[in-house]
Image (tube, rainbow, N blue to C red):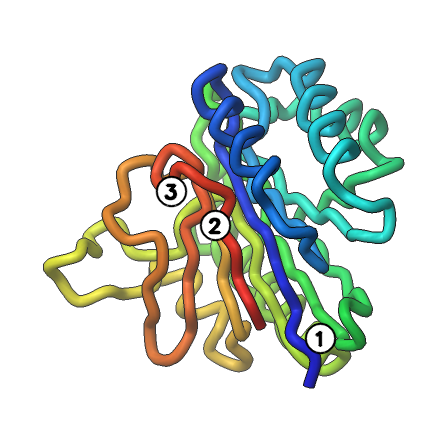
Amino acid sequence: MNTVRIAAVSDVHSPRYFAEFERSLSLLDTPDLFLLAGDMVNRGLIQEYDRVVNALEAKLERTVPIVSCLGNEEYNEDRMELVEQTRHMIRFLEDDAIVLEVAGREIGIVSGPAPLDRRSKTTELGGRSIRQRFEQRINRLSSLIEETAEKASYTILLMHYSPLAETSSAGDELLFSWWIAEAMMTTRPDLIVHGHTHSATHSRIEIEGTPIYNVAIPATGVITRIHL
């Protein structure tokens, strides 16, 4: 079976972190697939995405697929413009999935709902009951994972926020957040890639056989390389 070489990164939203991204990109062997886990710009400045695209275009061949989810720094009202602006190079997923042929293998990528941007003064519940909103989220993500796993030989869950319970830490038992755990009761992805967590002490952990990578460059200092 062919090895699939994945490069993944997120949280490139300051001059320091973008410099680390550029430096790591210059040293990177060309991957088969590039994943962006959100927060590639700062405070909704979507014009900053041009520098990300230019850096990727200078390094990668056009045949390398780039798939991204949205972070909380990609503000709600700018997301449609951002998707349109970068569609020639980047495929954005929001509560959606895609199956790609990569290095001779069918790789499925699933993305959960995009987070609210950091300025939001409203709760994520949007006035609906907690149970109703989370049941919808759980059912949607569960269906996406299950449907994608039926089509693909390998399924990746790409999300901005960490899928772990907030109480999980290096010294405690690691657990999935309750809604992620429920969404994966029927079918579990083969790999989870996320960002957002800047101060993590471990960039890779495993829960019940599922590898989970935190690819936030403030935590890793480099673009993360994953081999399937």
Q: Residue at x 72, y 82 (%)?
A: 150
The circle drawn on residue 147 is 1
Q: Residue furthest bottom?
A: 1
Question: What is the CA distance from the residue labelled 3 to the residue labelled 2?
Answer: 12 Å
Q: Residue at x 76, y 61 (%)?
A: 98
Q: In the displayed structure, does residue 202 sit left or right of residue 65?
A: left
Question: What is the CA distance from the residue labelled 1 to the residue labelled 2?
Answer: 21 Å
Q: Quadrant of residue 142?
A: bottom right
Q: In the displayed structure, does residue 87 sit left or right of residue 183?
A: right
**Residue 205, above or below 225:** below
Question: Mark 3 vs mark 2: which is more N-terminal?
Answer: 2
Q: Does any portion of residue 149 appear in the rendered image?
A: yes
Which of 202 and 111 lies nearest the eye of the viewer? Answer: 202
Secondary structure category for the residue under label 3: helix
Which of 13 and 133 lies nearest the eye of the viewer? Answer: 13
Secondary structure category for the residue under label 2: strand
Residue under pointer 2: 194
Q: Residue at x 46, y 22 (%)?
A: 118
Q: Label 3 crowding class (10 Å Cα cut-off): few <14, some 14-19, many 20+?
A: some
Residue type marked 2: His
Q: Label 2 near label 3: C-beta < 8 Å?
A: no
Q: Label 2 crowding class (10 Å Cα cut-off): few <14, some 14-19, many 20+?
A: many
Residue under pointer 3: 220
**Residue 85, above or below 114:** above
Secondary structure category for the residue under label 1: helix
